[in-house]
Image (tube, helix red, strand yellow):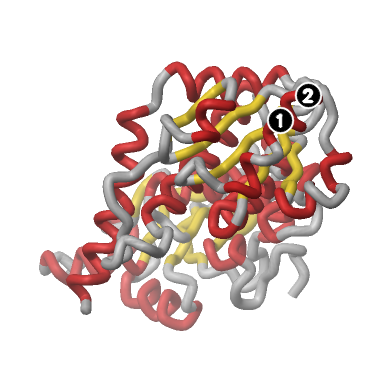
Amino acid sequence: MIEQIKEVLITEAQGILDLAAKVDASFEKMVECVFACKGRLVIAGIGKSGLVGRKIVATLISTGTHAIFLHPVEAMHGDLGLVGGDDVFLALSNSGETEELNVLLPSIRRMGCPIVAMTGNPKSTLARQADIVVDVGVRKEACPLGLAPTTSTTTLLAAGDALAVALIHKRQFKQSDFRRFHPGGALGQRLASRVGDLMLTQGLPRVSSGAPLSEVLTLMDESSLGAVLVTGEDGRLVGILTDGDVRHLVASGKLSAEVVDSVMTVNPRCVGPESPVYDALNTMEEYQITVLPVVDASGVLTGMLHLHDILGKGAFKFNGLP
């Protein structure tokens, strides 16, 4: 079973790699067409393609592109009135022969909408009626019967993500813009917060320079925060010792120091209380660390930020309240 699971993942990953190799001027034309659109991007599809289309719409509208999903059957019963001449129509169909979708195209054409097709069949009926055709075809589905849309839907979804990200770059969409569209979500709260809103200030695991290593290890065990901060007489941060450091010292047989200064990381990476939490998280991810000391402009220790505080786990949440 494990081998079967791996084969599915490899097949779908290969589908995306194949798509990357096929990206050409048609994809660029699609991006430019949507970027220049004065109305909305109207995305339509049936079945699994329709489900993927809804997700693409959700990604687009959260990143600054006005988009809606139009169900082809509902369109034939009045919802076509949602489409205007300033819109761009994006049709999703792996086969390109979806009757319920293709029957809409003459009406869309009469409205003056540019038609873009994402299809696995560049020679299909859909492709022939489109102004721009993006080939998202795959060599094989991950489904052993070759029937259930698997690789094809994964690849279509990836193409939609690529469109959204390309438009983010074109629009120079910023973190502040993202926050405006995500005021209530956990991610929006994270981006909107400052380090000072989330950091731990009480009961910090801190010791003075020159503290016995045995004392430091005891404090680290009691605090369960994965690190002990070392400060000088003036309160400025001078070093940090993490549980990862301790493991490395044990493994190397070098855990014989008497004071913390000889084994701590000097001048560790830190962050200011006014820094965006987004930047702190990026630093953690870049350097594979889970704790950041928080210091003021003079380097005086004011708090500690843990990855769990950012993720909303443990005693501290996104709103900064216990």
The three-letter amino acid code for the residue at tag 1 is Pro
Identify which residue, 297 or 185, lies in the foreground. 185
The residue under the point 37% across, 61% down is: 241
Whole-percent x, y for residue 16 in the image = 35, 43
Whole-percent x, y for residue 206 in the image = 51, 65
Identify which residue, 245 or 319, lies in the foreground. 319
Quadrant holding the C terminus? bottom right
The residue under the point 77% across, 28% down is: 87
The three-letter amino acid code for the residue at tag 2 is Arg
The residue wearing badge 1 is 106
Whole-percent x, y for residue 142 in the image = 31, 60
| Alpha carbons under labels 1 and 2: distance apart | 6 Å
Quadrant holding the N terminus? bottom left
Q: Secondary structure at mark 1?
A: helix
Looking at the image, residue 164 lies above or below residue 285: above
The residue under the point 34% across, 70% down is: 212
The residue wearing badge 2 is 110
Identify which residue, 199 or 20, lies in the foreground. 20
Q: Is residue 235 visible?
A: no
Q: Quadrant of residue 313?
A: bottom right
Specify few, some or many for label 2: CA neighbours under 10 Å numbering under 14, 14-19, or 20 or more. Answer: few
Q: Is residue 153 visible?
A: yes
Q: Residue furthest left?
A: 253
The residue under the point 30% across, 30% down is: 21
Q: Are marks 1 and 2 in contact (CB under 8 Å)?
A: yes
Q: Quadrant of residue 105?
A: top right
